[in-house]
């Protein structure tokens, strides 16, 4: 949710406040890391392709309930 929130915030020209949902480890939702807040209290957009964050494929495999075919 934090990553999705960051992407929405970055898409709005006049949005300069990032709402960080806590506790962060409960809202990572299958990602290997969450959005980081720097020492000045700023967050920065990712520079990697796609969402800019890596999906935790091992976690998703361990917690999978079913698979559509």
Image (cartoon, rainbow, N blue to C red):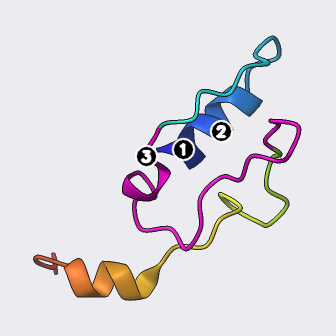
Question: What residue is shown at x 42% (from left), y 68% (from top)?
Answer: 30
- Circle on res. 23: 3
**Front disc: 3 or 1:** 3
Q: SS at mark 3? A: loop
| Number of marks in picture | 3
Residue 36 pos. (x, y %): 71, 53
Residue neighbourhood size for the residue with mark 3, other residues' Cα within 10 Å, grouped as few (<14), some (14–19), many (≥20): few
Task: In this rendered view, identify the residue nearer to me: 36 or 61.
Answer: 36
Left or right: 5, with 69 as reference point: right
Question: What residue is shown at x 33% (from left), y 78% (from top)?
Answer: 60
Question: What residue is shown at x 58% (from left), y 48% (from top)?
Answer: 3
Question: What residue is shown at x 85% (from left), y 60% (from top)?
Answer: 47
Q: Are marks 2 and 1 in contact (CB under 8 Å)?
A: yes
Q: Is residue 37 magenta?
A: yes
Left or right: 8, with 14 as reference point: left
Q: SS at mark 2? A: helix
Task: In this rendered view, identify the residue nearer to me: 24 or 28.
Answer: 24
Which residue is identified by label 1? 2
Residue 55 pos. (x, y %): 52, 73
Q: Quadrant of residue 54?
A: bottom right
Q: Is residue 13 magenta?
A: no
Give whichever of discs 3 and 1 has the lower sequence position: 1
Left or right: 2, with 8 as reference point: left
Alpha carbon distance from label 3 to label 1: 10 Å
Magenta-highlighted residues: 22-43
Q: Please identify the residue farthest to the left as the structure is shown.
A: 66
Q: Are marks 3 and 1 in contact (CB under 8 Å)?
A: no
- Circle on res. 6: 2
Q: Quadrant of residue 66?
A: bottom left
Where 28 falls versus 56 (above or below)?
A: above
């Amino acid at each position: 949710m934090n990553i999705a929130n960051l992407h929405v915030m970055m898409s709005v020209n006049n949005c300069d406040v990032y709402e960080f949902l806590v506790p962060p480890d409960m809202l990572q939702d299958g990602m290997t890391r969450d959005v980081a807040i720097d020492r000045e209290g700023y967050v920065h957009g990712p520079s990697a392709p796609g969402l800019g964050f890596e999906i935790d494929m091992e976690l998703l495999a361990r917690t999978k309930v079913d698979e559509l075919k």
